[in-house]
Image (cartoon, rainbow, N blue to C red):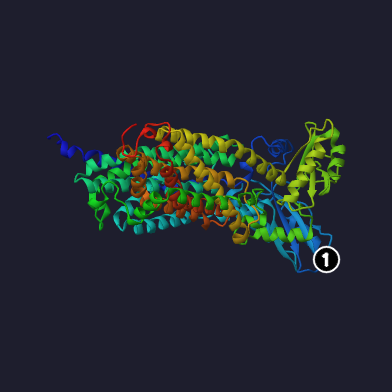
Amino acid sequence: MSPLTPRRARWLLPLVLLVAWLGIGATLGPYAGKLGDVATNDQAAFLPRNAESTKVIAEQRAFRQSETLPAIVVWTADGAELTARQRAAATRALSSLAGAPGVVGKVSPALPSEDGEALQGVVRLEPGLGEELPTALDRIRTAAGQVPGTTVEIAGPAASQADLSDAFAGIDGLLLGVALLTVLVILLLVYRSLLLPLVIMIGAVFALGLACAVVYVLADHDLVRVDGQVQGILSILVIGAATDYALLLTARYREELAARDDRFTAARAALRRSCGAIVASAGTVALGLLALLLSDLTNNRALGPVGAIGIVCAVLSTLTFLPAALVLLGPAAYWPAKPRLAEAGGGGHGIWRRVAALVDRAPRKVWASALAALLVCAAFAPALTARGVPLDETFVNDAPSVAAQETLGRHFPGGSGNPAVVVADADRLPRVTAAARGTEGVVSAVPVTASGRPGGGDPQVVGGRARLDVTLRAPADSDAAKDTVARLREAVHAVPGADALVGGYTAQQYDTQDTAERDRTLIVPVVLAIILLILTGLLRSLLMPVLLVATVALNFLATLGVSALVFRHGFGFTGTDASVPLYGFVFLVALGVDYNIFLMSRVREESLRHGVRQGVLRGLVATGGVITSAGVVLAATFAALGVIPLAFLVQIAFIVAFGVLLDTLVVRSLLVPALVRDLGPVAWWPGPLSRRREGGRQE
């Protein structure tokens, strides 16, 4: 058998890479739909590690009462008072549930409201029911429905978790389908090619399959945690990032292919000249996400490595599968379009020549106008409150648990059925109880007995500790309830020798919000430092990285300002989840720097050849179309998160989508080029470009 000739041998590597990725796609692709098997939507698994409410959960295990998920059953009769007969029937219905699958301990009797128009009872379920939770709730609903003349609703954490799981149902297919279809349509419009968009999409899907397989294995071994939110963000992040990097590489390949007739030489040149920018861009996003490991919130720490894995897989696909496919396809990849000689050297589109001419003609006016507009938007940023989302705003669509909670709140104290939990030394329990009852906003404080229910006997003592259930006047998810928890903690902490701790649902929300605020003060500077270091190494300058980071930070503040107005007056949100600003910062700053890296790495390349002034203009013209397309693609993919009817993901979708478009169309297109054009060579201080004259000669 004759050895391969050099001409034939160079086809071998692209073929091997293509076959390898086809194998990865066929073997690991199904994991994109299996990640939900190892995901959990139990929010108790994502609490702050060191918070007081988390310590209470650990102490509750000693009472054998931590492993419960309350379902609050509410009976009403259309404004009429309920009879003693109906109350007895409701109590019998609850008693029939004792020992049912998933039910923990004894079931409480049905208790009437003060107005006599409602009854409520609490059924405590196992928290790890997973897919069996809806069945358990249906069983409760069926039993409770035996009370004649009443309407039955189920509120509480169990009902909310069931609605949350329902919101994430089908996330694999729906979200991925919407994202891929959106990106495919945009690519078809951008490239006016039939084959290349499909190649880019296949590469993105391969990257997602690989990422999901890696995450699946890690989650299956309890090395990372995944919930519906992390799962959804991973899909969007991989599809968006892989498409963005592919756009940069394919645009450069088209330039090189137009300048030379050899597809192999063109591919090597395109890969060599775009690899640095792609790797640096991916590095900013991956390391920015890994900075979330510094968070004390478990869901933030979960997103960090999962997102970083997704970015690495996106880069791997872009730098291996895509070049191989482009080499094998050659000019046919752009069919029916054809790379033209005018595109060699970054000829660019006419609109970007006009933008570059505007920047060249009046740079100071351009950057001053853009800066003023961003500052006006940023002025509204303080109006965005991150104190959490109330239950009635958690779900974008109507949810049964929300309607039930509203019914419960009309007839019972807001915190009824979902009390704050106080654990203290048993010998100080009377004083702790008195301190709790004297706290403003507290309706009642009752020790839990050996039966597992408040009142009706001696307090249960385990290891010298006792538990107190404290009912709050305000709804458990409200700001007023969180303020009450703060006062309650102050009161019980003041009892000498009690070592009292306050937990429960409201305390968990309070601690999550407090922890999120601390996380922002720690993680934001770390992310900025990471980006500065990467930009300094890539651009060989100190002043330029500072300018770029300052502009994307301003873009983030401007986006928050616009979001505050849109959320309040457009969507009707009164607040955002505590983690939304941090997620928005990590995504927008890291991804915003991406586009500036794509632009400024090309500007630096052109400036070394033609001088700083021409370098800015040539770089803007050459990258304008591809970066704008990448921005539109990324904005569209993140906007796809809006198909999941949860306020958290809708808020993230809007912040990232709007922020990316603002960054792409204003910051990267106008503000940064105009600033660099106005500053001239000094913008590259202290690198070699800062000592160049406009003609390209060194001083």
Residue drawn at 22 percent across, 39 percent down: 12
Residue drawn at 41 percent across, 58 percent down: 181
Picture quadrant where residue 24 is located: top left
Query: From what the image shows, is residue 221 above or below residue 484?
Result: above
Picture quadrant where residue 487 is located: top right
**Which residue in the rendered view is the most extreme toward the left?**
2
Image coordinates of residue 294 in percent, x first then y, are: 57, 34
Asked if residue 47 can be seen in this view, the reply is no
Image coordinates of residue 126 in percent, x first then y, are: 66, 46
Asked if residue 408 can be seen in this view, the reply is yes
Query: From what the image shows, is residue 146 above or below residue 646?
Result: below
- Quarter holding the C terminus is top left
- Quarter holding the N terminus is top left
Query: From what the image shows, is residue 413 above or below residue 554?
Result: below
User: Callout 1: helix, strand or loop?
Assistant: loop
Judge the density around disc 1: few (<14), some (14-19), many (≥20) Cα neighbours within 10 Å.
few
The one of 366 and 324 positioned closer to us in this rendering: 366
Image coordinates of residue 262 in percent, x first then y, are: 19, 44
Type of the residue with mark 1:
Thr
Image coordinates of residue 306 in percent, x first then y, are: 49, 40
Picture quadrant where residue 650 is located: bottom right
Q: Which residue is mark 1?
A: 83
Report the number of numbered marks: 1
Would residue 636 be found to the left or right of residue 88 on screen?
Answer: left
Would residue 451 be found to the left or right of residue 559 on screen?
Answer: right
The one of 149 and 312 positioned closer to us in this rendering: 312
